[in-house]
Amino acid sequence: MANPATPRSLGYRMPAEWSPHRATWLSWPHSQDNWPTQLEQVRAVWVQMIRELSEVEQVYLLVNDESAEREVAARLQRAGAALNKVSFLRIPTADVWMRDYGPTFVTRSTTESPLALNDWIFNGWGGKYESYEEDERVAKEIAALLKVPVFDHPVVLEGGSIEVNGAGTCLTTERCLLNKNRNPNLTRQEIETFLEDTLGVAHFIWLGEGVAGDDTDGHIDDIARFVDPRTVVCIREANSQDENYRCLQENYERLRRATDQDGNPLNVVALPCPSAIYSDGERLPASYANFYIANEIVLVPVFDDPNDGQALGVLRELFPNRRVIGLRCNEVVVGLGAIHCVTQQEPRIFPPRA
């Protein structure tokens, strides 16, 4: 029997990303630790993201102080963003990875508290970056601002490690969720039970390894993504000599054998990979799967690569009712993440919040 205090027992579930949004949450990039020489190019990508997002939904942007707010507002105004749809919140952060340290929103079809959020423990991706642990408080601050219930969980988890189809299936990876640097005392079954209780899911598809250069230990949002309840895109490496070839082929085959929560086979669509990108001799986790689905648009990282057009074409066929927009992320991915890693959707509830 489920713990009566869990989101599931109270009727909450995590909606699919393509469900209607009220808002997108981001943090403004300010640290040169990730981007020692690329920070201005990275900020230009944020301006592009916010300009596109502000046309279709509310944007909440975390900034460190009043000075940063004035500077960013001026940049956005010059770029033609809809400033009436951008809300600045002075919440200092160490970095920008809102997908991982931010809240995971859940909803239920009741008039009382229809929106809530899960707050996981964020430990800097398995203790790799101690300075990032200060961002662990962000979810609670957002809950206080929105005045919504928060479920505080004693489990290490990042939002980029889970993907749901909104109908009961959760997609994740063994490399990340079963890693001893996260929850060494939890078994696979215990992790599944925890996700059932917190996301409202009932069925799991486990993939294996992540892409080379991914310091998150294989987040699913660089590998495979649902685009509707039965369709999942999965990156495939065409070059058999590439270090990603074997693990991505295995992940693709696992998906081909998998079913959804009702026992139906999945429609698995291949996404290409860009050619290997390096920074200071280190492979970067460049992936077209790190796209973000917003109201009416899909923001896709591209890399000045011959496969950019093919990836955008695949996604345009899968999202015929959304504009699919490529954003150049060559500098962004130097920080070991891209568009999905820095965004977090807040679902729209019905009737909408004021």
Image: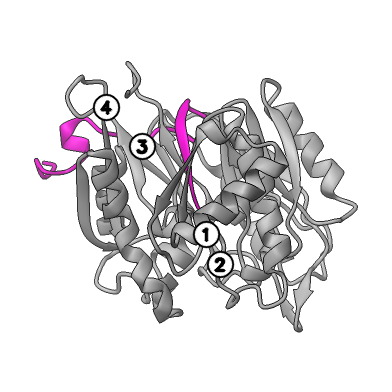
The local crowd at label 2, few if under 14, some if 14 to 19, many if 20 or more residues have their Cα within 10 Å, is some
What stretch of residues is rendered in magenta? 1-28
The local crowd at label 1, few if under 14, some if 14 to 19, many if 20 or more residues have their Cα within 10 Å, is some
* First along the sequence among labels 4 and 3: 3
For this orientation, the residue located farthest to the top is: 351
Of the residues tagged 3 and 2, which is closer to the observer? 2
- CB contact under 8 Å: marks 4 and 3: no
Q: Please name the residue that numbered disc 2 is placed on.
A: 30
Determine the residue positioned at 50% across, 53% down: 69
- Disc 1 residue type? Ala
Q: Please name the residue that numbered disc 1 is placed on.
A: 68
Q: Quadrant of the N terminus?
A: top left
Distance of mark 2 from mark 4, alpha carbons?
Answer: 36 Å
* First along the sequence among labels 1 and 2: 2
* First along the sequence among labels 4 and 1: 1
Element under disc 3: loop
Q: Is residue 227 left or right of residue 163?
A: right
- CB contact under 8 Å: marks 1 and 2: yes
Label of residue 108 in the image: 4
- Disc 2 residue type? His
- Disc 4 residue type? Arg
Of the residues tagged 2 and 4, which is closer to the observer? 2
Element under disc 1: helix
Element under disc 4: loop
Q: Please name the residue that numbered disc 3 is placed on.
A: 14
Q: Is residue 8 magenta?
A: yes
Q: Quadrant of the C terminus?
A: top left
